[in-house]
Amino acid sequence: MELRVSPRRIFRPLIPLVAPLAAALLLGSTGVLSAAYAQTAASAPQPKAPDTIASRVQGCIACHGAHGEGTDNDYFPRLAGKPAEYLFNQLMNFREGRRKYPPMNYLVTYLSDDYLHEIATYFSQQRPPYPPPAKPSVGSDTLARGQQIVLHGDPAKQVPACAACHGAKLTGMEPAIPGLVGLHMDYISAQIGAWRSGSRHAKAPDCMHEIATRLTDEDVNAVAAWLSTQSAPQNPVPAPAGSLKTPLACGSEPQ
Ligand code: HEC
Ligand code: HEC
């Protein structure tokens, strides 16, 4: 199975979109962006947006949804409701090159730590509904294998249960472990593939790198498939900080 996403598949149509968005962010105003939208909706009147954080993150919504809920694109993740420190770490990772996706790297290149914090906090507080869970695209044996690994791990391979860190309800844990519900199957397998191939890094010790390299292609396919078919719980908030003792040390999640 090919786990690495071909960047060309995603980038090509989007590069022209990103330049005006980056400009709007840097100016901290919506002027440039309104101009860009005006080209596509020339007849519609342009309301003057107030200069709030909600208006400044307009540059993000084409790919992440109006409230960070994600879009239909298989590789564009949900941001809403993930812990603020997790989102902040990712924005830093893109800025410093520990994660690679050129439009994201470009957008955050010149943004300050404070500004990235503000953006991360904003998306962590958004509570848009979750998409309906995906219909299973794999057989029931594969789904059962995925469920087994997520909830119980695979002791023979020293793979801990994903739920041990991502929470029994898979909604993550404060301050920096993300939820795994509401994500597309292809996004999940691409991220685990990126940890295996070394194109995604977290703060050392990088527990996800450890775990990703203990999984086979079949395992990754199974966990990604099962996770994508799960509904979000009623109250999809991350577990409180320190409520789970992580079975491996993770640099991004202090114990
Ligand atoms: C051109 C589309 C696009 C735009 C515009 C965009 N993003 Fe992204 N973003 C992505 C993709 C694709 C990924 C996943 C990249 C990868 O594979 O690592 C991502 C990943 C992220 C992540 C990590 C999510 C996670 O769960 O690990 C954060 C945080 C994020 N983006 C925030 C933003 C913010 C804030 C903006 C606006 C300043 C923005 N993005 C604009 C496409 C986009
Ligand atoms: C020892 C704790 C731990 C365990 C066990 C664990 N994770 Fe993680 N996971 C983390 C941490 C910490 C992060 C955030 C890393 C970062 O800052 O980039 C993370 C991030 C992720 C992400 C990125 C989510 C996104 O929005 O981009 C995925 C996908 C993921 N884990 C899947 C899994 C799967 C599948 C398993 C089980 C096979 C698993 N994790 C087990 C700690 C863990």
Image (tube, rainbow, N blue to C red):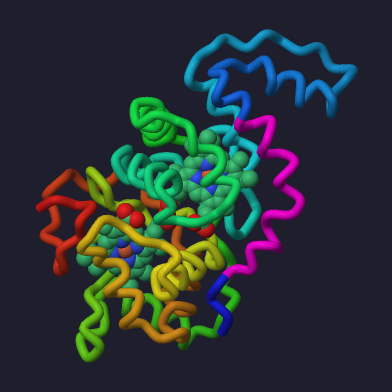
Image point 39% across, 34% down: which residue?
A: 120
Report x, y in % for residue 51. 54, 12
By secondary structure, the bulk of the magenta-drawn segment is best described as helix
Image point 60% across, 35% down: which residue?
A: 61
Image point 52% across, 46% down: which residue?
A: 105
Report x, y in % for residue 241. 16, 45
What residue range appears in magenta? Answer: 5-22
Image point 71% across, 10% down: which residue?
A: 47
Question: Vertical placement of 50 versus 85: above or below?
Answer: above
Q: Is residue 193 left or right of residue 38?
A: left
Report x, y in % for residue 234. 37, 46
Residue 130 lies within the magenta run: no
Q: Is residue 213 left or right of residue 252?
A: right
Q: Residue 49 versus residue 149: which sits nearer the camera?
A: 49
Total numbered labels: 0
Quarter of the render that holds ligand 2: bottom left
In which quadrant of the rendered image does the N terminus lie? Answer: bottom right
Work out whether residue 221 can be spotted: yes
Work out whether residue 168 can be spotted: no
